[in-house]
Image (spheres, rainbow, N blue to C red):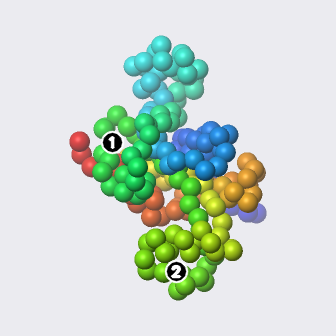
Amino acid sequence: MTEISLPQDPALATAVLEIEAHVAEAGWDQPSRLYALVDTARIVEQEPVLASQMGLDSAAADGSFTPVEQDALPDQTLEVTLESIAWPPEVNGCAAVVERLVLPPGVDDEIPDDPAAAEEFAREHPLRQEVRIVAGVTRAGATYCALRLRAHDDDSSVVDGTELVPGLLALLRSTMEVEV
């Protein structure tokens, strides 16, 4: 019998997949986005009018996160932006959305050291793939990711799991650890 691997935090997995589906509706070539993940029960309790407008009720609130999209990010890479972010305690987690080019294994030695040349190399490489990454973390340490390739742009081809993009997850974790 095959063992089914469940996410370490189903609420985080649900929020990441919700964000991925929402962003996918708008298509490709979008800017990076950042979301605060807030305990839905807290929104229902503290902001009942807002919760009602969002279609949230106490039944939906139990054990779930509500993604709250942040304002447009500064004109710099998401990675640089994340280095300067610290979330307040009422934010239970965060998620980031970013589009990137990925290259197949085995071409690492061909990538130029110069960042601009490396970017051009990736853009021009015939085997490049465009990928949208949604990565999320919680203050408790849970992680979850969803990846969609532009070449396989359908809901059934989204790949998801807990540690798919370790570098981005580490940056997101660091935004949760800083005291404000």
Viewport quadrant of the N terminus = bottom right
Q: In this view, which residue lies farthest toward the bottom? A: 109
| Corner quadrant of residue 90 | top left
Q: Tell me, for residue 111, which label it has, or none.
A: 2
Q: Tell me, for residue 59, which label it has, or none.
A: none
Residue 167 lies, with reference to residue 137, above or below; the image says below
Q: Earlier in the sequence, mark 2 or mark 1?
A: 1
Q: Using a 10 Å C-alpha cutoff, classify the residue at mark 1 as few (fewer than 14 neighbours), some (14 to 19) or many (20 or more).
A: some
Q: Tell me, for residue 87, which label it has, or none.
A: 1
Q: Is residue 5 visible?
A: no
Tell me which amino acid carries mark 2: Ile
Residue 52 lies, with reference to residue 22, above or below; the image says above
Q: Using a 10 Å C-alpha cutoff, classify the residue at mark 2 as few (fewer than 14 neighbours), some (14 to 19) or many (20 or more).
A: some
Q: Is residue 155 visible?
A: yes
Q: CA distance from mark 2 to mark 1?
A: 35 Å
Q: Horizontal placement of 144 versus 150: left or right?
A: left
Q: Nearer the viewer, residue 50 or 115?
A: 115
Q: Position of residue 159 (x, y in %)?
A: 66, 57
Tell me which amino acid carries mark 1: Trp
Residue at position x 49%, y 45% in the image: 33
Q: Position of residue 21 (x, y in %)?
A: 65, 42
Residue at position x 54%, y 16% in the image: 52
- The kind of secondary structure element at disc 1 is loop
Q: Nearer the viewer, residue 146 or 108?
A: 108
Viewport quadrant of the C terminus = top left
Residue at position x 58%, y 41% in the image: 19
